Image (cartoon, rainbow, N blue to C red):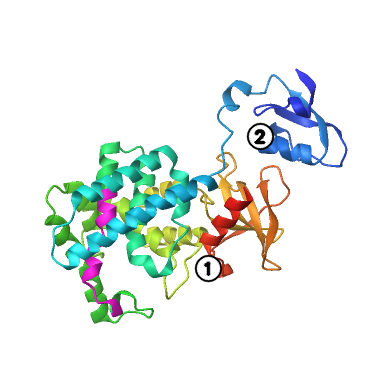
Amino acid sequence: MIQELSITDLKVGHFVIKIAKQKGKYHLTHADYIKSDLVIKNLIAKGVESVMVDLEKSKLAKTSTTTKKKSIIADVYEAKKLFDESKEIQRKVFADAVNGRPLDLEAITAITESTLKEIFRNSDALACVINIRNKDDYLLEHSVSVSVLITIFAKYLQIDKHIVKQLAIGGFLHDVGKIMIPEEVLNKPDKLTVEEFELMKSHVVHSIDTIKATPGISDISLEVAALHHEKLDGKGYPYNIPGDQISKYGRIIAICDIFDALTAARCYKDGYDHGKAFGILRSLVEKNHLDGPLVESFINCMGAYPLGSLVELNSRKIAFVEQHNRQEPSKPVVKSFYNAASKEYYDDVQLIDLSVENDYIVKGVSADELSLDMNKVIEFLLKQG
């Protein structure tokens, strides 16, 4: 049944065929469902007064309670507090390791349980926090971020929660051995010499020894830490384990570890945008270093444009990815806040649903390449509401 409906009566789930009355000249490209309240607000803003809807195709009961999603910006600062608390626990872990003291597994378990709880409640906020990084804190933040990423990914893969907890602890501790590596090697911006690379590779053995010496640590936590640099072609380190002996959990942490290393900024290099990082992960699949199906699952888990990442639109607007669009992954809801042409912040941010707007994403970008500070970006967006 086709019926004309006032824009004020339009709801999420209605199937709109065309615009009936309007003050402007807006044109719908195709008939479609109303996916969010934001779409309705955009129609109102364009002067649409009424639309023609197909009531038989409309799915009000199914979608009206599920498609509305609040902004994640307000949750980011709360999640950042948890991330910073994790960094302080990680700082103590490194101090204990370098001084030969036993690790405080109770504190590590408590913080990973808090992270697990937050991710199972709202993984989006912590995923965004990973993008707010301090170049000078890479060693601390990398271990925390890998723990967050492996938890998000394991949740997506529907791995049992008690296993996810052990994976998170393993991710938290996987690089503890790096505290034993001389800083001039650890933070060297140039290519390592053969001798330096051999020294760098020894961090995994140091990690294994430290974790083994921790009373109460699980076999799974030790396993993921031990396997995070092994490759399917058997040419990884430290043990050159062949692919058929690398467990699923070892394959998972390898992906999370590399992805975070690629996207994180360091004192001597900028981080890659997510799209480029995904491309590198796929190239490592072709080289038989990483598990192909798991890499594709990881990319699907993070989304074509991960929440909290930055994108450049065809209009030269720089925008923050606010909401996924599972039906059309290349058309998320974004908040534009910066003009790439003039290199200036906008006076007001604009929430844009790319599934209904004519604008589109040209490419993913990193804050570093735009000389932007993600902490300031989040603060600006939070003030703008």
The answer to whether residue 337 is left or right of residue 107 is right
Q: Residue at x 64, y 35 (%)?
A: 36
Which amino acid is tagged 1?
Asp
* Magenta stretch secondary structure, dominant: helix
Q: Which residues are magenta?
A: 168-184
The answer to whether residue 317 is left or right of residue 26 is left
Residue furthest right in the image? 23
The answer to whether residue 273 is left or right of residue 121 is right
Confirm whether residue 33 shows in the render.
yes
**Nearer to me, 159 or 233:** 159
Q: Which quadrant holds residue 266?
A: bottom left
The residue tagged 1 is 368
Dot 2, crowdedness within 10 Å: few (<14), some or many (≥20)?
Answer: some
In the displayed structure, 288 sits above or below 63; it is below
Q: Which quadrant holds residue 362?
A: bottom right
Q: Quadrant of the N terminus?
A: top right
* Number of callouts: 2
The residue tagged 2 is 37
Instruction: Pick whichever of labels 1 and 2 is earlier in the sequence.
Output: 2
Q: Position of residue 171 (x, y in %)?
A: 29, 53
Between the residue at mark 1 and the residue at mark 2, the CA separation in whole angstroms equals 33 Å
**181 in the magenta segment:** yes
Q: Residue at x 30, y 37 (%)?
A: 161
Q: Secondary structure at mark 2?
A: helix
**382 in the magenta segment:** no
Q: Which mark is residue 109?
A: none
Confirm whether residue 299 shows in the render.
no
In the displayed structure, 63 sits above or below 185; it is above
Q: Position of residue 250 (x, y in %)?
A: 27, 52
Which amino acid is tagged 2?
Asp
Q: Position of residue 384 (x, y in %)?
A: 63, 51
